Image (cartoon, rainbow, N blue to C red):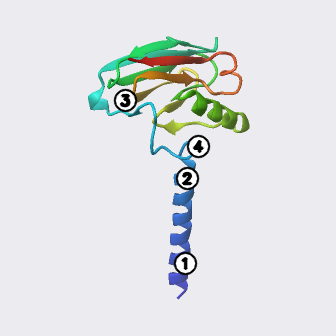
Amino acid sequence: MKHTCCKFAATLLVSCLAAGSALASGTHSGGHAHYSYGAPGVASKVTRTIEVEAADTMRFTPSTISVKKGETIRFVIRNVGAVAHEFSLGTQKELDEHYEVMKKYPNMEHDEPNKISLQPGAQGEIIWRFTKSGTVQFACLHVGHYDAGMKGVVKVK
């Protein structure tokens, strides 16, 4: 009987931890079921690679990017600075909401399809398929960086 209770308790604990991880891994506005501006891309479908530098001048280079509707882009983001930066794709509303969360939890790191956190000197990538015409924002949402102008746009035509 002791083993059955221990197995039940262990199963319950693992289930609770898994549920908590699933809830914590979503966006701060309710999960990743849908992106209004596109979808995570597949590496084999990449049509173009765009390199982006994140610098301590609180700027991205380039800060304006043009893509075609339907394109799958590999963004290679390189932190050329001495402080941590991130690259977050989203709507203006999503970025503003996420920035408020970053103010509360400034050491948050991201492992989401539309976001990447980069330590100084690090490089990473986001593969994204743009499915709708319009403008998609990107920004570094570390406290102070966004306010200093570390943002840009992807124009989808």
Image point 38% across, 27% down: which residue? 130
Image point 54% across, 71% down: which residue? 12
Type of amino acid under label 1: Cys
Q: Judge depth for marks 3 and 2 and give the one in front.
A: 3
Look at mark 3 in the image and give the residue it sits on.
Answer: 131
Measured Cα–Cα span from mark 3 to mark 2: 26 Å
Measured Cα–Cα span from mark 4 to mark 3: 21 Å
Image point 52% across, 46% down: which residue? 31
Q: Are marks 2 and 1 in contact (CB under 8 Å)?
A: no
Whichever of callouts 4 and 3 sits on the residue coming sooner in the sequence is 4
Q: Judge depth for marks 4 and 1 and give the one in front.
A: 4
Type of amino acid under label 3: Thr
* Residue 106 in sight here: no
Q: Is residue 85 left or right of residue 89?
A: right
Type of amino acid under label 2: Leu
Q: Which mark is residue 23?
A: 2
Q: Judge depth for marks 3 and 1 and give the one in front.
A: 3
Q: Is residue 131 left or right of residue 152?
A: left
From the viewer's perspective, is residue 20 above or below residue 26? below
Whichever of callouts 3 and 2 sits on the residue coming sooner in the sequence is 2
Q: Which mark is residue 29?
A: 4
Q: Quadrant of the C terminus?
A: top left
In the image shown, does 122 or 51 lie closer to the viewer?
A: 51
Measured Cα–Cα span from mark 4 to mark 2: 11 Å
Measured Cα–Cα span from mark 3 to mark 1: 49 Å
Regarding mark 3 in the picture, which secondary structure is present there? loop
Look at mark 1 in the image and give the residue it sits on.
Answer: 6
